[in-house]
Amino acid sequence: MSLRSSIDQHTWWNKVKAHRYIRISLFFILGMVTYGLLVSNVIPDTFEVELGTISEQDIRSPLTIENREETDRLRLDAYESVEPVYSLKPRYAQNQIERIQDVFHTVKQVRAEADLAESEFEIDLQLDVREEAPENDETLDMTGPISTDGMLEKVRTTLTQQTSDVLSDETLITLLESSSENLQMAQETTTSVVDDVMNIEIPMDQVSEAKDQAEEKVLTATANFQLSRAMIEIARFGITPNYMLDEEATLEAREMAQEQVEPVMVREGQLLVEEGQVITSELYQKLSLVGLTEEVTMFYPYIGLAIIVILLISMLGYYLSDAKTSLKTNNTHLLMYSLIYILSLGIMKLVSIMHGIELDGITYIAPVAMGTMLLTILLNARIALFTSMVFAIIASIMFNNQATGILDYSHGVYIFFSGIAGVFFLNKSHRVMRVLQAGMFVAIINILVVMALLMLKNAQYGWMDIGSNFGFAVLSGFIAAVLTIGLLPFIEAGFGVLSNTKLIELSNPNDPLLRKILLEAPGTYHHSVMVANLAEAACEAVGANGLLARVGAYYHDIGKTRRPHFFIENQMKMGNPHDKLSPQLSKTIIIAHPYDGAEMLRTNKLPKELIDIAEQHHGTTLLKFFYYKAKQELGEDVSESDYRYPGPKAMTKESAIVGIADAVEAAVRSMQNPTPEKIESLVRKVISDRLEDGQFDMCDLTLKELNTVATSLLETMQGTFHSRIEYPDDEIAEKKEG
């Protein structure tokens, strides 16, 4: 007889199912489908408009964008509208006063030098007269006092060229000939007048008026006509423009004026062209700006959508690859996920097209909860929750009524809560009635979300509008439940997915295979039920699939139905046929039962997970009884490998735990007077023997989890193999006779 194992079944298709490039291709397809369904929602419509034509309809902006050309024009106008900024220069007054002071100081200095020269001349003259010399000696050379012209020349030489050029000879001579008192008065008066006038603003075009003002002040201050004329000339010379252009302040003011100009925005929904309006160059420019003319191709929406889709699919791929489900290695299940994903998006797209229908709340009919409920049943709640978030993001784009750049967050929120409502309600049970109840729960959540969204919009709604919104929200829940129930059998059959619903169905005692075990091998049936109780509790204790372990335990020994009486639990009061068989033949019969069972399960098209448990629960363990019996009969020339199950070893936690529970239940059942201490010792020995034998090498059970499994098995068996009252021998005899 040929013994089949999963190692022998690693065909080309099995390799393809886990191939990395197949996974990458599936995620690529998901991305392309997502992009294809969303691209129409980000690309605005275009209009056939030409300059000078009349618009046949109202045209509104599909997006909000800055009109930079208009903004720049307004900012240039603001810049140029700012008048030049002038400022008073106090330093100019000080400079002019210093110049006037310099004039008077120079005059005083030249006069002092002249007075000194005159004094020296008179002294020298007196001394020379007393000396004996010819009276008419023409050779006598005596330097006389400095003349007025000499002093004038001296003053002009000392003054700056600019000052000298402005002041007349008459003015300088008047100053030179004035008394010291008048000269001091003239200096103080002129300086005061110039200081007063120069400390007020004097623009370039008002210099003449300022000089006239200074002249009036001088005339008022002195009565000496000749001196006043000189003072007036000096004062007028001292008056210069002091209110000058401030280039830095002007530039700052103009830049500030530019900054205060708000950007000219074209708002989303803003009416750009009215029906019947002539398309001017200005209007055409606005239409081109928002991408509504055929000559404009906008690439940014394509790129932006591509980035969002890449991020979504990348996060989805990372999460699904990291999830502790069959999606991590089984591409067939990933294909199933992809089809549910695409189907859900397709339904969303069809509903989004209804946006144009004048019926309030029509888009709330989208039964997206169908997708998350299917994923909860077929995979697990965590994957369904993550997918619900992805659906919410996609919905916010898909339900934007094709307004470029706009996200409809209200539909995103609605889709998110609708999706997770079904997940939470189905998390504990997947029965058909539970799915219908989940549909009702989704409907209630939908109503609450729609109510919240209507309140947030703070708009006035009539009772008909509210009823319409609520009605479509309720329909969404019921349609999702009906679609889930209708699609579930086809998906399970098509992809070989073992859902909890299917497991519950297979656990029905009226199932033909279970009835076959019950009728043909009742001892095996009772043993399987006990193993199921032990395995389910242990699996749940370590986070494995307890329901899968229970149902797998029901079917794990179905191979014994081919030769039920060769297994001790079915022999009742019969003799043991192995007593009459050689160890070699006995081990062949015993070893065959996992593979006979796997073949029977395949023939009846049971899920692969149950077939694996039936095939793997013994792993490559040794049939110790027949091995040692053979050694006794044949001597030492017996190969241990001939008395081992050919495997494969347990590849999942569920298979390993069912194998442990199977061995423990059989061993405890064969114990004489089992006590808690004996049971605990036996349980831990079974686990340690299998661990040392390498039976857990192919599954990911940790030492900590094995200890948890042992604890769970002991707790479960305390209620099953509880201690009984021992009757006296005579009472036992009476009971047997009775």
Image (cartoon, grey):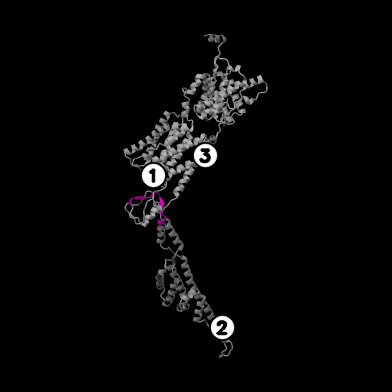
- Name the residue at the front extreme: 1
Instruction: Give the alpha-carbon distance from disc 3 to disc 2, as whole Å.
Output: 128 Å
- Write the start and end of the magenta stretch as one range: 56-70
The answer to if 603 sits in the magenta stretch is no
- Name the residue at the right extreme: 636
Residue 204 % position (x, y): 42, 68
Check disc 2 and report the residue beneath it. 124
Q: Residues within 10 Å of mark 3 (few under 14, many from 20)?
A: some
Residue 465 % position (x, y): 33, 39
What's under tag 2, amino acid-wise? Asp
> Horizontal placement of 178 versus 683: left or right?
left
Q: Are marks 3 and 2 in contact (CB under 8 Å)?
A: no
Q: Residues within 10 Å of mark 1 (few under 14, many from 20)?
A: some
> Looking at this view, is 557 or 110 the one in front?
557
Instruction: Give the alpha-carbon distance from disc 2 to disc 1, as whole Å.
Output: 117 Å
Residue 655 % position (x, y): 55, 28
Asked whether the viewer can see residue 111, the reply is no
Check disc 1 and report the residue beneath it. 401
- The kind of secondary structure element at disc 1 is loop
Q: Residue at x 62, y 19 (%)?
A: 582
Question: In terms of image quadrants, where is residue 476?
Answer: top left
What's under tag 1, amino acid-wise? Asn
Q: Is residue 30 above or below residue 673?
A: below
Q: Nearer the viewer, mark 3 or mark 2?
A: 3
> Looking at this view, is 309 or 684 the one in front?
309
Q: Nearer the viewer, mark 1 or mark 3?
A: 3
- The kind of secondary structure element at disc 3 is helix
Check disc 3 and report the residue beneath it. 22
